[in-house]
Amino acid sequence: MSGRGDPPEGTPDGAPGGGEDEYRSMVFDESFIRAARLQENSADERLGEHHAPAVRPRRPWVRLPGSRQALLLVLLIVIAFGTAIYMGVRHPYKAAEPGLGAQPLRSSVVPLTPPGAVPGGAPGDLYAHSPAAHFRVGAAGVTLPANTARTPHFSGGQVVEALRLAKEYLIRSSIDPATLTGGNVRSVRLLLDTGQLDQFDRSMARPVDDGRHAATGWLIRFDHGTTALADRNVRVDGTLGASESGPDSLDVTADYTFVYAVRATGGADQHAAHGTGKPVPGASSLFTVRREIHFRLDRADLADHRLEVTQSSLQAGPMACAPQADVLRPLLAGQHAGDARPAGTDPYSRQWANPSLCGRLAATSQPTPSHPIR
């Protein structure tokens, strides 16, 4: 039987090495053929070109050892990954980090006590015989400045947008009936810079008269268990202004007075707890709030339609001289402030706002209705 690889007729006679082929050790496998630098042209190629050589050179096929191929693959992956990270960091449209540099709100609420009994009457009569007689109604009272100029680093359009955002905040937080009566405050929350949302949520859930977490620092809302709106048409008057606080931010200042017609609701005992005497049944009274608010807006806030409320100072009356951190509790028609006085003030305290502040409501600020209800 012939050996493996031998011809069927056996090994030719006279072959050296006792029948062993001297070229037997050379293996012409596929890799050897691909590595050849010369390749014979086909018959068609030789017929198509008269001067075509019988063979043509082949491009060398470089084969790297397995370890070098793996190293090259790892290197390419590292380069691709590094490029992706670099492009993500340097991309001009990278979103700003939420709440970056947002300042916490600082607020104060000053109750104003009346000199005598709160006047009562019909809402229209009260408005007509009060300093708010010439005020506009609702959102129409929050007006933008007639002339809005650009600043060194912000265009006129950006300044107008900042003023519009402040106006929208004033409307949602001071005029919207849902906000005033203890309803959903999501519309106010949506306008806040994301860096202030935690402070806002804590102020709504656990209000404290500490100058930072009073719900009344963010918005105006009444104790809906004792007070209702007698007229949804709030009277409004004030001013808005904007200035540049730096190359990357605008400051907007709002100084507005809001006048509400309110009436009693609920049990008379609840009202007596916030003042002397029971409210006159069926009578309305006016409640006046002056809000001075400072807003800050950077370029990210303008793009996201948000703002920061950095400072809020509120004076409101007629009210009893008591903390007003969660809601405002107006004294209603026929009630007196009583003998309540603010708690003692500690001059060693480093708190920004003094929770014990209380003021006196001027008699001239009270309405003198033509048909008072007593």
Image (cartoon, grey):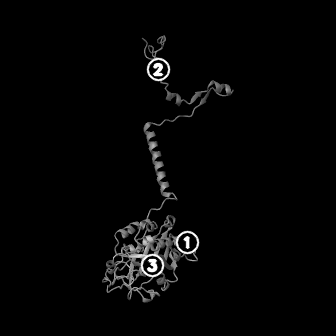
Q: What distance separates the C-alpha of mark 1 from that of mark 2?
A: 91 Å
With 188 as the anchor, is 342 left or right in this view?
left
Numbered label attached to residue 192: none
Q: Quadrant of residue 225?
A: bottom left
Q: Is residue 153 visible?
A: no
Q: Quadrant of residue 329?
A: bottom left
For numbered disc 1, what is the local secondary structure? helix
Q: Quadrant of residue 103?
A: bottom left
For numbered disc 2, what is the local secondary structure? loop
Q: Earlier in the sequence, mark 2 or mark 3?
A: 2
Q: Earlier in the sequence, mark 3 or mark 1?
A: 1
Quarter of the image that includes the N terminus: top left
Pick the front one: 153 or 212: 212
Where does label 3 land, which residue?
260
Amino acid type of the residue tagged 2 in the rendering:
Arg
Q: What distance separates the C-alpha of mark 3 from that of mark 1?
A: 28 Å
Q: Residue at x 52, y 71 (%)?
A: 164
Where does label 2 land, which residue?
24
Tag 3 near tag 1, CB within 8 Å = no
Question: Where in the figure is residue 219, as x and y percent of width and height?
Answer: 42, 73
Tag 1 near tag 2, CB within 8 Å = no
- Circle nearer the viewer, 3 or 1: 3
Q: Residue at x 63, y 24 (%)?
A: 43
Q: Earlier in the sequence, mark 1 or mark 2?
A: 2
Amino acid type of the residue tagged 1 in the rendering:
Val
With 49 as the anchor, is 216 left or right in this view?
left
Amino acid type of the residue tagged 3 in the rendering:
Tyr
Tag 2 near tag 3, CB within 8 Å = no
Where does label 1 land, which residue?
160
Q: What distance separates the C-alpha of mark 2 from that of mark 3?
A: 110 Å
Pick the front one: 67 or 151: 151
